[in-house]
Amino acid sequence: MNEREMKRIKAQLQTTETIFVIFLILVIVVIGFVIYSKFHEGTIKEKQREQRAREVIELAHRMSSWPELECSASGAQQFVCLDRIKLNVLSDFINKSRHTDSQAFNYYYDLLGDSQIIVKEVYPSNTQTYKKDYWRLYNNPGSTSHQNIIWVPVNLYNPLSRTYAFGVMEITLYE
Amino acid sequence: MKKKNKEASENMKHRKNMKKAQLEMIGLTVIVVIVIIAMMIFMVYKIGNPREDIKKRYMDKEIATNFLIAMTNTNVAECNNLTLSSLIADCARDYHQINCYDLNSCQAANQTIHTLLSRTLDEWGLNYNLSVQNTDISFVNQCKPGSDQVSGFSIIPRNPGQVEVSLRICQE
């Protein structure tokens, strides 16, 4: 084997080595990119989850002191208290405005989005009779089956008998 | 002689090359081991530290606080529509003054709180620990000692002093 032949074989070997190294680096880069993408996807999903949690908290907070339903004694607003008579009026109003597709429903849609809001009495009555101890205030399920349910314990004030019952506001948020 | 020297020199060169290759292999193995250990540490850290569910914690806190406020304001139908707070305050006294037909204030309060809990927190699958200071009223539902808890408190005025009602919801 002469020197020229040797050099040729060495050059070929070096070229093969370079190609192999480049290929290996490319594989490592691709694997790294895939891992990074997966990690980044997880971060984005986590951020979406946090955003959703913030929305849920905001809505629950807003609903527990809804001005349309608050009960007041001698002008003083009471905490976590809903007026039964206002409940009847508001549930009628929202349901009617949903059917007529009026401006009022758009107002509540901006406020509540795709959700369902139910108020039910738990004590003393617990018969789940519509408008007696069960009110569906708002129902707009959206297109997804994923849902998030929040319960807010409240008092239900009867201004006629001036008594407080124990109730629960059930807020279902559709994702 | 010259041929022998050349052979010995080539042998030496070959051995040197072998040693170099071995060293490179060891270096590569060390790098791979370091990368694997780093990845394992990262994975263990990620799995071992799950992100705290802020929403659940906040909502449980809201439930605990709102439950106590709503509960103490509720009128008890079985006891002349007296509020539960007045029954609890009477129950915390040495001598009970309120009687609801065949129940005393402690029994009536106990019965009402049990009804409220069974129709709400029990139904929602929450583990809790509710207690009323200076009384025998206490409800515990699978709250493991040492578990992370969120608490709500309510103070009921009593003459003299006050009664503290606490509700702890367990984060399990």
Image (cartoon, grey):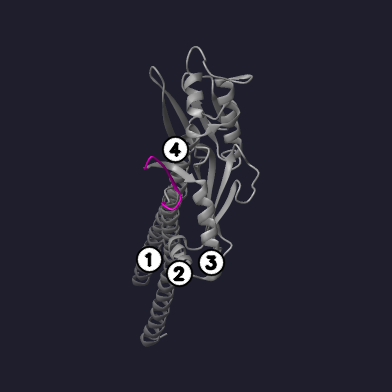
Circles 1 and 3 in contact, beta carbons < 8 Å: no
Circles 2 and 3 in contact, beta carbons < 8 Å: no
Which element is circle 3 on? helix
Q: Chain of mark 3?
A: A
State the separation of the CA atoms marked 2 and 1.
Answer: 85 Å
For residue A103, the mark is 2
Q: Residues within 10 Å of mark 4 (few under 14, many from 20)?
A: many
Question: Where A162 sits versus A114, above or below?
Answer: above
Q: Residues within 10 Å of mark 2 (few under 14, many from 20)?
A: few
Quarter where residue B18 is shown: bottom left
Q: Position of residue B160 (x, y in %)?
A: 38, 17
Q: Which residues are magenta?
A: A67-75
Q: Position of residue A48 (x, y in %)?
A: 43, 61
Tell us which disc is closer to us: 2 or 1. 2
Q: Which residue is mark 1?
A: B17
Q: Which residue is mark 4?
A: B65
State the separation of the CA atoms marked 1 and 4.
Answer: 76 Å
Which of the two labelled residues, at mark 2 and mark 3, occupies the earlier sequence position? 3
Q: How many numbered tags mark residues here? A: 4
Question: Where A136 sits versus A2, above or below?
Answer: above
